[in-house]
Structure formats: C-alpha cells, structure tokens
Amino acid sequence: MMMKKMMAGVALALVFGAAQARTPVALVEPERVVVAASAGTLTPEQVKQAIVRGGARFEWTVVREEAGNIQLKYNKQNKHEVVVAITYDSTGYQIRYVSSVNMKYETINGTPMIHPFYNTWVGNLSRAIASEATAAVAGK
C-alpha cells in the first residue's frame, strides 16, 4: 500500500512539474552585449561571424541577413520554433524576439509572455555568441 502511495505521489509530481514548465513567463529581452575589449576590437564582419558560429553551437540557423542585422531561427524537434533578430556592429550585439510557433506567446497587461524555454534558449545563444566574440578578439 505504501508503495502505491509513493508511486502516485511521484506521478503527480511529474505531471504538475511538466505543467509548470509550460506556464508562460515574462519574455526577457537581453541587454546589449558589448564585445570590444581592452585586448582589441572586432570588425562588424567578425561580430557577425561570432553570431553565426555561436548560433550554430545550439542549432540556430540564419534565415535573413543584411548589414548590421541578422535573423536566426531555432527549431526544437519540429514542435517549437523561435525567430530572433540580432543587431550588431563592431562593438557588440543585441538580441530581440521576432516570432515563435507553439511557444504560447501572448501579451498580458502590456507584458509579453512566452514558454520558459525561450529565455533559456536565448540566454544560451547570447553566451555562445559572447564566447565566440571573445575567441575572435583573442585570435587577432
């Protein structure tokens, strides 16, 4: 009997934990990241390449690019899709939300809300880009 109660408790925890993970949270727009360092600066092309390489680490793909602006798309198992725009120059970059599919995006009381994985994915992307930019500065 005790084992049945424990298994039921574990099952409920899994169900409620999974439901909680899908509850929309505030969409976080990351601050502009400065990549110029005392060790040197990068060209806009080097920053763009850092964005592309950093995105590739987490399977983000380029969907559009023009001078100073690049759009990346992330597709998670054909279930979720996110598109971000990244503006950049020789000193840094900034990531902005563009669109999503199956990410529960909505605006509530003026606050954009989205699936919590979005903030994680974009945070990982930003850190990967910063790492690539740092490596490019070190490699100069």
Image: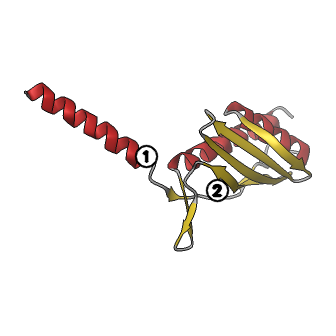
In this rendering, the label closer to the viewer, 2 or 1: 1
Check disc 2 and report the residue beneath it: 30
Q: Would residue 40 be seen by someone viewing this image from the given angle?
A: no
Q: Would residue 59 be seen by someone viewing this image from the given angle?
A: yes
In the rendered view of the protein, which quadrant contains the N terminus?
Answer: top left
Q: Which mark is residue 41?
A: none
Q: Which mark is residue 21?
A: 1
In the rendered view of the protein, which quadrant contains the C terminus?
Answer: top right
Say which residue appears at 66% left-offset and 34% top-offset.
58
Image location of residue 80, percent across then percent down: 60, 42
Image location of residue 62, percent across then percent down: 80, 40
Q: Secondary structure at mark 1?
A: helix
Say which residue appears at 35% left-offset and 42% top-offset.
17
Answer with left or right where residue 26 lies relative to residue 31. Answer: left
Say which amino acid is labelled 2.
Answer: Pro
Say which residue appears at 56% left-offset and 45% top-offset.
120
Image location of residue 63, percent across then percent down: 81, 43
Residue 87 in which image quadrant: bottom right
The numbered mark, 2 or 1, whose residue comes first in the sequence reads 1
Say which residue appears at 32% left-offset and 44% top-offset.
16
